[in-house]
Amino acid sequence: MSSLYDRHRAVIPDWVALYYRHPIELTHGEGRHVWDADGNRYLDFFGGILTTMTAHALPEVTKAVAEQAGRIIHSSTLYLNRPMVELAERIAALSGIPDARVFFTTSGTEANDTALLLATAYTGSNQILAMRNSYHGRSFSTVGITGNRSWSPTSLSPLQTLYVHGGVRSRGPYAGLSDERFTEACVADLEDVLGQTRAGVAALIAEPIQGVGGFTSPPDGLYAAFRRVLDRHGILWIADEVQTGWGRTGEHFWGWQAHGQAGPPDILTFAKGIGNGMSIGGVVARAEIMNSLDANSISTFGGSPVTMAAGLANLTYLLDHDLQGNARRVGGLLIERLRAATAGVDAVREVRGRGLMIGIELTEPGTDRANPDAAAAVLEATRQNGLLIGKGGGHNTSALRIAPPLSLSIAEAEEGAAILEQALRNL
């Protein structure tokens, strides 16, 4: 492994992060488990950053990929593509957006980049509202709207971005308020921000649950309250569902549905889990918005027949096996188990989340300061005991991220929780 690590460092940029003091090479997986090059077996509670959504080596997906690859691997969007149309039809129907059109990309970054293009072209404005502590991708436009300095390497941007309160419930100037007062304060902040702008802001982009930011979220209904303000000003709402889509939150198929009192978003972006590891992203929007571009455009790799076949098989499996319901049931048990396990652990500030999207925020004992050293130590300890998890956090926060495949069993949830409890209690 040291040889591969040396080779990696010689040719891969320094800013491509690797987990663990001694990075591991994952060679294969099955179900909720993966194996490294040394033969060690791990329970996977991170799924390649929420991407292996159903299971590793899911037979239905691998079969669909192999069969499609045996026919034709690539054609581009210049030709009719049956798997792409079929998947688009299903996603349009599931999206909740009326008269929906779907455009496929290869990643969440590219999906959000496309959403920004659509919103700015449709409104004729380059002004974007984004949430503090947010993350939307690694392209030039998406780092410019990312409210998390750890993941935004430049302040240069083609967009003018203004950041709004509300994505983090338990930190910041409104943390001590009730949910109702918190929402009122955030709406007042939104109104105040709009008073600082030129007329004609294009869109608000928001993750219903912030992913890289540490699985933080506002009270249910906050974005519905925002939507009422946005509608008065002719501002679009973009829901970034790259991490929250497809039933991961358990209670809803899309994260925006926890804020659906004012209707669906104007634009929805997705990626990660739909391909179960294959490279799929995309945008859903009302036809008038999607069709507002007045120049030619195609996608060379978005909508590839192979990735579309994988997406169709994966989505079918997810719906047929009610994995959203499983995320609700098993995730509910897991979060309560983790709350009980961390009671009295001074380093744990909060256990939060819903479904199989759970964050554990760590602080220096007796303070409200982030504790990244503790997060790193827990990652190492859980890895040593056969569990892979993630980490994240925004301004002065440090959190563990737990997001297993949605087919996780109760026994596997208990196994992972026990490993996490031991690591946290040994801090």
Image (cartoon, rainbow, N blue to C red):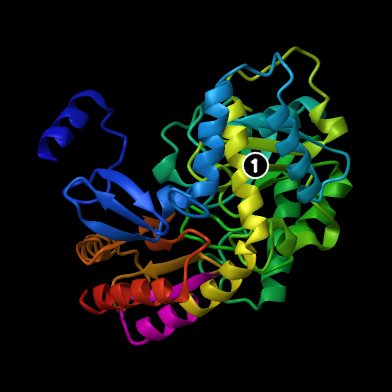
Nearest the eye: 115 or 307: 307
Vertically, is 146 above or below 20? above
Vertically, is 227 above or below 268? below
The image shows residue 352 at horizontal and vertical percentages of 50, 71
Nearest the eye: 278 or 137: 278
| Residue at 48% over, 34% down | 138
Q: Quadrant of the N terminus?
A: top left
Q: Quadrant of the C terminus?
A: bottom left
Q: How many marks?
A: 1
Q: Residue 253 occupies which quadrant of the picture?
A: bottom right
Residue 20 visible within the image: yes
Determine if the magenta segment contains residue 352.
yes
Nearest the eye: 198 or 45: 45
Whether residue 362 sits left or right of residue 308 in the image: it is left
| SS category of the residue bearing label 1 | helix
The image shows residue 70 at horizontal and vertical percentages of 53, 25
The residue labelled by disc 1 is: 312
Residue 347 visible within the image: no
Whether residue 385 sits left or right of residue 199 in the image: it is left
Q: Residue 42 occupies which quadrant of the picture?
A: bottom left
The image shows residue 195 at horizontal and vertical percentages of 76, 46
| Residue at 52% over, 55% down | 54
The image shows residue 259 at horizontal and vertical percentages of 74, 62
Mark 1 residue crowding within 10 angstroms, few (<14) / some (14–19) / many (20+): many
| Residue at 17% over, 28% down | 7
Amino acid of disc 1:
Leu
Vertically, is 188 above or below 128? below
- Residue bounds of the magenta highlight: 335-353
